[in-house]
Image: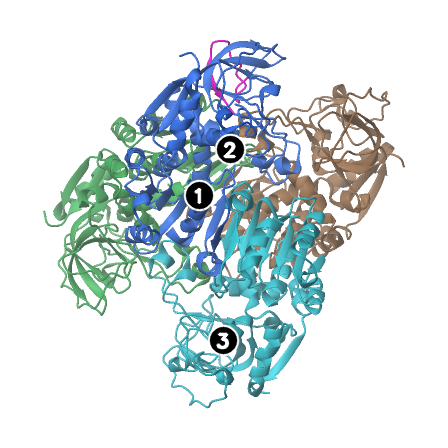
Chain colours: A cyan, B blue, C brown, D green
Amino acid sequence: MPGPDKLEQARACELREFPLPELEVDSALLRVELSEVCGTDVHLRDGRLTGVPYPIIPGHVSVGTLERIRGTICDVNGRPFAEGDRVTFLDVHLTCHSCWYCLVAKASTRCPKRKVYGITYGIADGLTGGWAEYIYLKPGVRCIGMDGIASDLYMAGGCSLPTSLHAVERADVQFGDTVLVLGSGPVGLSAIAFSMLRGAGRVLCIGAPDERLTYACRMGADDVFNFTEHTLTVRSDWVLQRTDGRGADVTIECTGSPAAVTEAMRFTRDGGRVVVVGQYTDHGVTSFNPHLDLNRKHLDIRGCWGSDYSHFHRAVDMLRNPRAAALWSTLKLERYALTKVNEALAAVESGRTIKALVVPTR
Amino acid sequence: MPGPDKLEQARACELREFPLPELEVDSALLRVELSEVCGTDVHLRDGRLTGVPYPIIPGHVSVGTLERIRGTICDVNGRPFAEGDRVTFLDVHLTCHSCWYCLVAKASTRCPKRKVYGITYGIADGLTGGWAEYIYLKPGVRCIGMDGIASDLYMAGGCSLPTSLHAVERADVQFGDTVLVLGSGPVGLSAIAFSMLRGAGRVLCIGAPDERLTYACRMGADDVFNFTEHTLTVRSDWVLQRTDGRGADVTIECTGSPAAVTEAMRFTRDGGRVVVVGQYTDHGVTSFNPHLDLNRKHLDIRGCWGSDYSHFHRAVDMLRNPRAAALWSTLKLERYALTKVNEALAAVESGRTIKALVVPTR
Amino acid sequence: MPGPDKLEQARACELREFPLPELEVDSALLRVELSEVCGTDVHLRDGRLTGVPYPIIPGHVSVGTLERIRGTICDVNGRPFAEGDRVTFLDVHLTCHSCWYCLVAKASTRCPKRKVYGITYGIADGLTGGWAEYIYLKPGVRCIGMDGIASDLYMAGGCSLPTSLHAVERADVQFGDTVLVLGSGPVGLSAIAFSMLRGAGRVLCIGAPDERLTYACRMGADDVFNFTEHTLTVRSDWVLQRTDGRGADVTIECTGSPAAVTEAMRFTRDGGRVVVVGQYTDHGVTSFNPHLDLNRKHLDIRGCWGSDYSHFHRAVDMLRNPRAAALWSTLKLERYALTKVNEALAAVESGRTIKALVVPTR
Amino acid sequence: MPGPDKLEQARACELREFPLPELEVDSALLRVELSEVCGTDVHLRDGRLTGVPYPIIPGHVSVGTLERIRGTICDVNGRPFAEGDRVTFLDVHLTCHSCWYCLVAKASTRCPKRKVYGITYGIADGLTGGWAEYIYLKPGVRCIGMDGIASDLYMAGGCSLPTSLHAVERADVQFGDTVLVLGSGPVGLSAIAFSMLRGAGRVLCIGAPDERLTYACRMGADDVFNFTEHTLTVRSDWVLQRTDGRGADVTIECTGSPAAVTEAMRFTRDGGRVVVVGQYTDHGVTSFNPHLDLNRKHLDIRGCWGSDYSHFHRAVDMLRNPRAAALWSTLKLERYALTKVNEALAAVESGRTIKALVVPTR
């Protein structure tokens, strides 16, 4: 994927050949089975993220087979992986565990040393993206064994799994709560499922288009609303009618639209919680009334950035649970060969695909 | 205090005589020793709050002597008060302990049944404000004995005690944290003191005018900055220079200015907490960038509305501690007779007084 | 139910007739549809609880129809109930919302004023138990409408619903956690279900007899173990083998045996949480090693006493969710007429019944 | 310090000479200014800890000057240290940040890879203890600059600083709480100070001997009691009389006696918190009644093991605050040359010294 400084017609991925890397000690070569195309990849194509060392190989969350291991790579239980094992890996690398954010604030997703495969690692760093036949797993990359979990099932969630699990953790859902999810893209869909699995009494979703809302219901939403067909007032009434006039206990914003953050405050009951996880790129400002929307409501608003190893690990553990697995297995997957990733990007951008996977070996 | 629909020259308090009430069972008559004039009283005078049943007797937090008791009034330990006891009381009355907010959300400060002495009780409800010789403590009003605490000391904090204690509770201050307080009015000054008492390593304050900042230092601020003399950029740099370039761990907004809420987000480090307690009336909107100011920062923003009994009780308990008492005893008090409350309101509005008290018996 | 000072052959319930009460303002008469027999009722029969004003009418959690209302009884949303409505009610009455425990500690289950229908209310207080054709709902009793929830389904959980929901709240279950439930009585079975609904990755249960363990699996347990057939060492190994040698993340003790509390500490991983909810009567002491079992393990041990309104309300809300309802609908119910309650008590004591209900109209 | 398998008369430290180490890349040589003798050192001498690779050089928390640096050593803000800088360091080394405890449970004090200077590092690992002229700071050891903090002041707290700060963090002290500290050794004394600094309304201490209790008062205790002079019943009454008959809100056990853990449960109010931080070695068992002491009390009991970097960092930050520094500066220090450490151990064991420091250069 070239950088955004290219002419518009060049803002497309191109296929390139690279030599396989020389493995460092305690590194490995992963033969990619499945990678994915997510909303961030569209933003990457359009140059909307800062700090990206173009050209890059996109694809941050992937699953594959350990083709070659030099030295030893262990899981968190200290068990060494063997060549041939099927794994995923934490796309975040180099969290330093030495800085103030890591050690004092214990906010490792804000560690300034972090590098992310497929996003802030580029071609200059080697085979560091999933839209490729092989990924080079540098020393220190943390792998998770996929025993008992089909690759399809895991990639149906893909990067939305740790992102939305983290968001639902931050949402502090209580038994019986009404959770409102804004947005019906992959993060929104997974947030619906995790909210159900967390003990919500009811999950509402406002999103679009209708096909995605159908999937929202399969993922556990009790009621859905197409925001493109209704004014803000009508949407607000729709929420209030389903919450005894109070608003949702928890609202999880997964839209990408700044205005949705203000709407999330207004759709939430006094003393409730708003988690903002849909603002991964800069789409501009929004305005709100601090008295009416925040202070008098005694509201909690929580930004949610990135994931750490625990979110991947817990997401994988959840998929080992048949009740959870059943939810993600309902999602429709579209597969694209490496030669078709530009079409995959277009499909994701349009919102007409539920989940686009990249199949390098196709 | 008349309502805001009067002509401007009439927007002033006038002295009136009322008969003493017939006491209901388990009620009492409080002879007021001290009441106070706070920023909310200025807003009340100007009609900036909704739901106020003008005309009212202002004065919500007060201290006095139980002149007459009919039936029994007990403290929370079940000990009955005697006539002659010196007490303060929770200005919030009628919290229902029966509604969804009280019983399910456990957010009793959002109970819709609440009435507040001096604010949402008016003359039609009886002697329900502190700017008077007597207050009628209706059945169910919760009194707190003031044994061992000088009335002056308690009223030096006044209503800012429970408000700022609640805000600092919500701020989740950790040992060694740098807390930034925006605003140097009574709530800001008490927030400085409570932050110190909570284990902050350092407290910074941005406020005005200089005299109040002098008091901020006496209340425990390590460093202060006059916002009227510096641009936003200079203020931001001032914070970053004192926080290793990261911003404050915790920012407590106590200003009344909507723009300060956005500034609070920007002055706070990634993964930090912002408590908004300065927006008790509607001063309009502010704008922010959800990506830069919230989501990427992994920020927590917490509105903080009202107080419940625990905040009063804990504040009084703190003043029994000499280390805490020493802080509030530094504040300069100005006393006004009942005939001078309009001057007191003007003094508070101007910001040139630190703390204005009303002395009915003067 | 007579008191324990009777001769042993008299330790049996006897049927008595009482006049219907004169209704006070804002009270009601409930025609009982279903009540239940729980472990506490066996302890009540045997005089193992303190503060019981024998003779009493047992039966604390019940469901029925509002036969007569005098004045107004509202739900927490302020909607008045009508005669003919089917409801359950919070068995705890008179929580004072005025004492230090209620207002400062916010630990209302420790309010000393509480009275519990069927336990600490006796015949002298009127028709205050569920093993009767009618219950007198005194002023202040909080009812919950049962629209959309079958009485059978609700009573399949009965008093174990709020008790175990509270315990699982206290357990702070994280996504993917392994939860170990000790005990397979009604509280244990409901704790299994709520742990699953809370996001546990896996639930293990050690209990007995085998039939109950079969139901444990239906309620969501992934693996079960009959403690009567294995030594402590074998049980411990069983847990360690299923938890990578670490122990459970969370153990919820629901047994009634003091020794199980110490075992719970040992079956739990370092840094994990133990919730003790099975010690509602005094069965004596247990011993443990504070260094090995607590301090070095960095363990959290949490007693869990009683329920408040929120636990009932949230439990009922959960049953409105079909996924949750499906779990409790698997439990086998045995119904007993009022004339057969002594047999019901014997069945519960033996552990051979899963859930014994009392049907007054049978 | 030899191991416990020596004859009793040999259970004494002996002075030995070692060559200075060859520095690895990114390591340093620290010239020790002050180290300390703590209760754990007495247990080490007596062989009461497991996993100690005797012979060892005791002394875990120390302060000194960076005499020689090879490569680069940075603080958590990324600022490199220079030779000549005065520092302390986290005595825990090799926390792996790769295992399940580090990454999933986020309970790094239970990381099995940890090695502690002066305790689980021995002579075979090099100069790894503070009772020496030099300490070898291996690559990865985390140093903290001591600018603005006198070495005396820091070592007056020594290892009790992070230990008790961690305990008070776990205690969840609320404004105005009554905190009871059991034990008046260094950890108890620091726990008193940190409880005050955290917002306790009052701190009580039960300990011995009287001289230590005098220091307890200087550290912030409002009232003290010598347990050696009173029966358990009298001690219990003493606590209840100071807490409206309820018990302490928080009890922090810092004694080393198993029975004190049970007493801590009984001295604490219903719904309160007990932190157990005094059971660092195995002194045997204690018994309690799970119904009366735990379940019915709705109690939280929290083991507290070890410290991580944040506890050291926050403790140092607190000492930069003059209010905090004033507390620790009241403690009486006794200084011992390297040739006198056996006398220092005897003094600590007897309880007659408040704080014993080792001065290698004396």
Residue B62 place in picture, x, y as percent:
46, 21
Select label 1 or label 2 by which is in front. 1
Quadrant into which the N terminus of chain C falls = top right
Quadrant into which the C terminus of chain C falls = top right
The answer to which quarter of the image holds residue D179 is top left
Task: Specify the subunit that label 2 lies on.
Answer: B
Residue A253 place in picture, x, y as percent:
57, 58
Residue in front for this viewpoint, B256 or A270:
B256
The answer to which quarter of the image holds residue C202 is bottom right
Asked whether residue C241 appears in the rendered view, the answer is no
Task: Specify the subunit that label 1 lies on.
Answer: B
Mark 1: few/some/many CA within 10 Å (<14, 14-19, 20+): many
Residue in front for this viewpoint, C265 or A333:
A333
Determine the secondary structure under disc 2.
Answer: loop
Give yes or no for residue B78 being in the magenta stretch.
yes
Task: Specify the subunit that label 3 lies on.
Answer: A
Whether residue A171 is situated above or below residue D37 in the rendered picture: below
Whether residue C223 is situated above or below residue C15 in the rendered picture: below
Q: Are marks 1 and 2 on the same chain?
A: yes
**Amino acid type, label 2:** Ser
Residue in front for this viewpoint, C252 or C25:
C25
State the mark number for residue B307. 2
Residue B69 place in picture, x, y as percent:
55, 10
Q: Which residue is mark 1?
A: B257
Give yes or no for residue D251 being in the magenta stretch.
no
The answer to which of marks 1 and 2 sits earlier in the sequence is 1
| Residues drawn in magenta | B74-90
